[in-house]
């Protein structure tokens, strides 16, 4: 892992995917990479291991089916492409061919959330709800580009499937100094300590949550930011602890439908564990097909941009039982 | 079938295979007569000869060594014919027929409507949702190629399931990657669940579709054991570069006259009285098939 990148710099998560897979190809001679015509990220692996690289063209369903067939024969396949199509067009292959027999297939993709200005055909905004519903599937959403490499590396020894969601993956803000956090699949990361309120988030909006926390710090408010990069299995312990340590005040921010994603996962834990909260606010995509605009404009338009996040945190802090 | 490093023992004659196919059909009917739930008996009977030819002649497998890396892989893409596969495998020695018929469809049984590898390790993969098996087989064939293994990956599809687009994605992938170690048998019974195929979906010119996708196409009568054996014997070497499809012309419900070409027998249960009637019909069709000169004429439909 490169150590020259520090907080605030921009790095391409896609290049991290390519570099990491090319490295892992040496360590695992049964690692395959398959793509439905989104292979630009993967050229390092392709050039190094052409016999274990497969571009099937525009055919998401068979990309996942072939991956399952390879996994049945003892291989570790990675399918890499655009998530709106891998998560929905190939959903049944993911469920039936991969999750049902619990095969070690990794789905790594870009365009999670309202990113890329592609319009609603190209936004993966339901994907986390769909993937979290699948038995045996581990579900992650990653904002820090350097973490992408670490999560892929850790996933190599997992028995079952994993879904790794990125935003566009071309220009991502480095959130953590390498080695700053103990990254473990299934465990949340406390990106900022705080005592007044906890904001849970994942993926591309972690940076926004940190910015919002910084904004409130100017008023002397202490916001805990939890990067819940694993949505399934969910880190229950950090939810329980944060409820106790931040006055039962929760805000959940995500670049996904406000219902069905992380907020729903956390609400389930809150209900199941009988946690008493002071406030619970969801910031995410309402039930709309979002239209065009850049990421920031769309978040502002649909009520989960930086200003809305700051307002939600203030409102949560002001809430009394 | 290919270079033999895994001993498959003495191969059966065509006559012996025909006898085994009869045994498979009679066991299918017995299960259908004793199990109260639905059995996909029509599509089971249409592929009984194909599965007999594969498990008793074509496939290099060892029932006592399920994980032998040299084994041929078999993928039942038409997962609805699970019962026919279970019983064909039982006759081959993988499991006991009694274990199937005594527990089929019951709580905690390894045997149900569609095969599950987690519950029944003897099968290669979990299938049932149609259009999934050929992509799985492509992945397995790629893996074999990469390892330099010489086993085949064989899959059985129903013609109806080739209406699924994922089949043609896989057909392209197989050709693009020159998977001569991949063989698809098509149970071309020309019936869907609720209609006769060509009434609703134009499949023809069916062999030309596969040819257009670049496959080596073989056409046989799927109920003529001699033709099935010849097709297996004639498969190209596993290191060749074209995948092969063996299109087997079949009859849904084959061998039981009141089930043949009958939409009512896509799936069902017989019960004791109908079991007797079905067995009588099966025996009659067997006697007809063994009549001198039979097999030289076209199916009397």
Image (cartoon, rainbow, N blue to C red):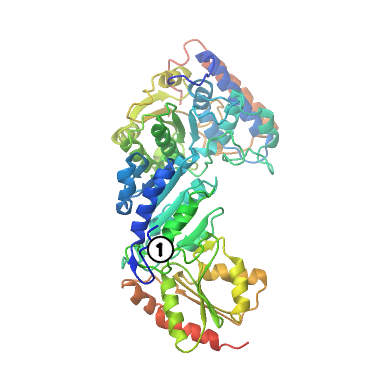
Q: Nearer the viewer, residue A123 or A147?
A: A147
Q: Is residue B87 above or below residue B287?
A: below
Question: In this orientation, which residue lies closer to the viewer: B276 or A10?
Answer: A10
Name which residue lies at 50% across and 40% down: A72
Q: Can residue B201 be seen in this view?
A: yes
Which chain is mark 1 on? A
Name which quarter of the figure residue A287 lies in: bottom left
Rate crowding at label 1 as few (under 14), some (14 to 19) or many (20 or more) other CA atoms within 10 Å: many
Residue linked to disc 1: A124
User: Which residue is most to the top?
Assistant: B292
- Up the image or down, B63 lies above or below B160; here it is above
The N terminus of chain B sits in image quarter: top left
| Side of B121 where B135 appears, left or right | left
Q: In this view, does A258 lie to the left or right of A123?
A: right
Q: Which of A246 and B35 is in front in this view?
A: A246
Relative height, residue B217 to residue A196 (above, below): above
- Which residue is depicted at the point 38% across and 42% down? B201
Q: Position of residue B72 (x, y in %)?
A: 48, 28
Secondary structure of the residue carrying tag 1 is loop
Q: Position of residue B268 (x, y in %)?
A: 60, 38
């Amino acid at each position: 892992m490169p150590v020259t990148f520090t907080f605030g710099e921009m790095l391409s998560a896609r290049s991290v995917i390519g570099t990491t897979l090319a490295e892992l190809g040496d360590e695992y001679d049964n690692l395959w990479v398959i793509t439905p015509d989104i292979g630009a990220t993967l050229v390092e692996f392709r050039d190094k291991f052409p016999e274990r690289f497969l571009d099937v063209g525009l055919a998401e369903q068979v990309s996942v089916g072939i991956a399952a067939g390879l996994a049945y024969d003892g291989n570790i396949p990675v399918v890499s492409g655009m998530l709106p199509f891998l998560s929905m067009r190939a959903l049944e292959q993911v469920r039936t061919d991969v999750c049902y027999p619990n095969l070690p297939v990794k789905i790594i993709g870009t365009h999670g959330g309202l990113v890329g200005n592609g319009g609603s055909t190209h936004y993966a905004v339901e994907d986390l709800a769909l993937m979290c519903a699948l038995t045996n599937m581990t579900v992650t959403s990653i904002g820090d580009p350097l973490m992408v490499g670490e999560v892929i590396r850790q996933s190599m020894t997992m028995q079952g499937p994993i879904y790794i969601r990125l935003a566009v993956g071309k220009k991502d803000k480095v959130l953590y100094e390498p080695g700053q956090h103990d990254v473990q699949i299934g465990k949340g990361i406390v990106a900022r300590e705080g005592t007044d309120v906890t904001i849970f988030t994942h993926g591309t909006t972690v940076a926004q949550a940190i910015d919002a926390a910084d904004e409130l710090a100017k008023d002397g408010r202490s916001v805990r930011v939890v990067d819940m990069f694993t949505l399934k299995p969910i880190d229950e312990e950090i939810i329980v602890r944060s409820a106790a340590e931040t006055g039962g005040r929760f805000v959940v921010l995500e670049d996904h439908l406000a219902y069905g994603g992380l907020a729903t996962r956390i609400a389930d834990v809150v209900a199941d564990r009988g946690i008493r909260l002071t406030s619970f606010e969801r910031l995410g995509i309402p039930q709309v097909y979002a239209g065009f605009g850049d990421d920031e404009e769309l978040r502002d338009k649909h009520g989960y941009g930086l200003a809305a996040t700051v307002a939600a945190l203030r409102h949560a802090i002001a809430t009394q039982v | 079938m290919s270079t033999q490093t895994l001993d498959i023992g003495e191969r059966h004659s065509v006559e012996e295979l025909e006898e085994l196919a009869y045994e498979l059909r009679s066991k299918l009917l017995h299960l259908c007569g004793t199990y109260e739930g639905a059995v996909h008996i029509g599509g089971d009977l249409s592929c009984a000869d194909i599965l007999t030819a594969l498990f008793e002649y074509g496939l290099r497998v060892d029932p006592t060594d399920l994980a032998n890396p040299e084994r041929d892989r078999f993928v039942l893409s038409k997962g609805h014919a699970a019962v026919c596969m279970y019983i064909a495998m039982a006759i081959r020695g993988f499991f006991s027929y009694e274990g199937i018929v005594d527990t089929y469809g019951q709580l905690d049984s390894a045997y149900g409507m569609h095969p599950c590898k987690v519950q029944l390790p003897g099968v290669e993969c979990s299938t049932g949702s149609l259009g999934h098996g050929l992509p799985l087989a492509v992945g397995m064939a790629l893996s074999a190629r990469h390892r330099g293994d010489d086993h085949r990956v064989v899959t059985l599809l129903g013609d109806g399931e080739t209406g699924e687009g994922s089949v043609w994605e896989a057909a392209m992938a197989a050709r693009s990657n020159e998977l001569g170690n991949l063989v698809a048998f098509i149970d071309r019974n020309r019936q869907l669940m609720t209609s006769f195929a060509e009434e609703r979906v134009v499949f023809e010119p069916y062999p030309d579709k596969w040819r257009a996708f670049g496959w080596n196409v073989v056409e046989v009568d799927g109920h003529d054991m001699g033709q099935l054996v010849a097709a297996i014997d004639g498969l190209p070497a596993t290191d060749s570069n074209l995948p092969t499809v063996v299109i087997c012309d079949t009859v849904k419900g084959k061998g039981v006259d009141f089930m043949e070409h009958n939409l009512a027998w896509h799936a069902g249960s017989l019960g004791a009285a109908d079991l007797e009637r079905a067995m009588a019909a099966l025996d009659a069709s067997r006697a007809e098939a063994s009549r001198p000169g039979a097999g030289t004429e076209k199916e009397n439909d």
